Image: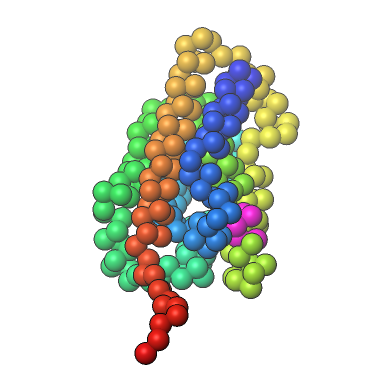
Amino acid sequence: MKAVLRELAQARRHYSKLPFFGFLRCESVVPHDRLAFLPCAAPLIMALPDFERLVLRDAESRHPWQRFLDAHLDRGGDSWRAFLDDFAKLGFDRSASVTQVMRGWLRDDARASRFMGTRLAQIAHGATPLEKLVIAESLDGTARVFFEHCAPLAARIHDGGGPQLRWIGQAHFAQDSSRALQGLDRRALESIELTPPERVRCLGLAFQVFDLFADWSTELLAYAEHALEQRPRVVIARGLTA
């Protein structure tokens, strides 16, 4: 299993180099504008609680790895509430009605985000408790990269007199980091002996998750760039005389 976790760390490093995260680091764009992707991200954020509760969890299982996974998921809380709070604080519900936002979810440029919950469920369908753990670790890997880039933006917005952002900000990032499979439990996970077919299966599931989030990140970048291009621009005429 240690070899699988090493591959996941490598996949996370590759994921962090995608253009979307370069955009989040781009100092030529003000922090608030770098979060223009949030409406496109909403379908996934709202779908994740059901995916974790109905697909990854299994309260009736007595399998030790399933019980460990259930405890791992319990630490996530209901972060979707914090997401909606940040969404409102950043003014996205003032710039568009609920109807406009929901209609936007059905546009082609939000397709990947709209399908994320379903595709994650397809990946996890029939997975063993150990395979579910690998899927959860892959999800945590993508989340760590995401919040490592978003948390500094939240801090910059707050330091500049803006609102305190809970989901995007450091508090949620710290909570999400604590969910990673670390410490004694991680060492126990690393010690698991996998047969070659099991190793191939675990890696295949993990890579599917990272590929899915790579497509999602590409869509978020395109959405943000389009949103910024479509904003009304104020043109100030200089040096005009009557």
* 136 horizontally vs 100: left or right: right
Image: 160 above or below 1? below
Task: Specify the quadrant that holds the C terminus.
Answer: bottom left
* 32 horizontally vs 125: left or right: right
The residue at the point 57 percent across, 42 percent down is 145
Q: Nearer the viewer, residue 176 or 223?
A: 223
Residue 208 rendering spot, x and y as whole percentages:
42, 29
The residue at the point 68 percent across, 25 percent down is 188
Q: Residue furthest front?
A: 241
The residue at the point 40 percent across, 86 percent down is 241
The residue at the point 64 percent across, 35 percent down is 181
Task: Specify the quadrant that holds the N terminus.
Answer: top right
* 147 horizontally vs 112: left or right: right
Chain part drawn in magenta:
151-155
Residue 169 rendering spot, x and y as whole percentages:
61, 58
Q: Nearer the viewer, residue 125 or 97?
A: 97
Main secondary structure found in the magenta portion? helix
Quarter location, residue 98: bottom left
Image: 104 above or below 164? above
Colour style of the rendered protein structure: rainbow
Q: Residue furthest right?
A: 184
Residue 79 rendering spot, x and y as whole percentages:
53, 56
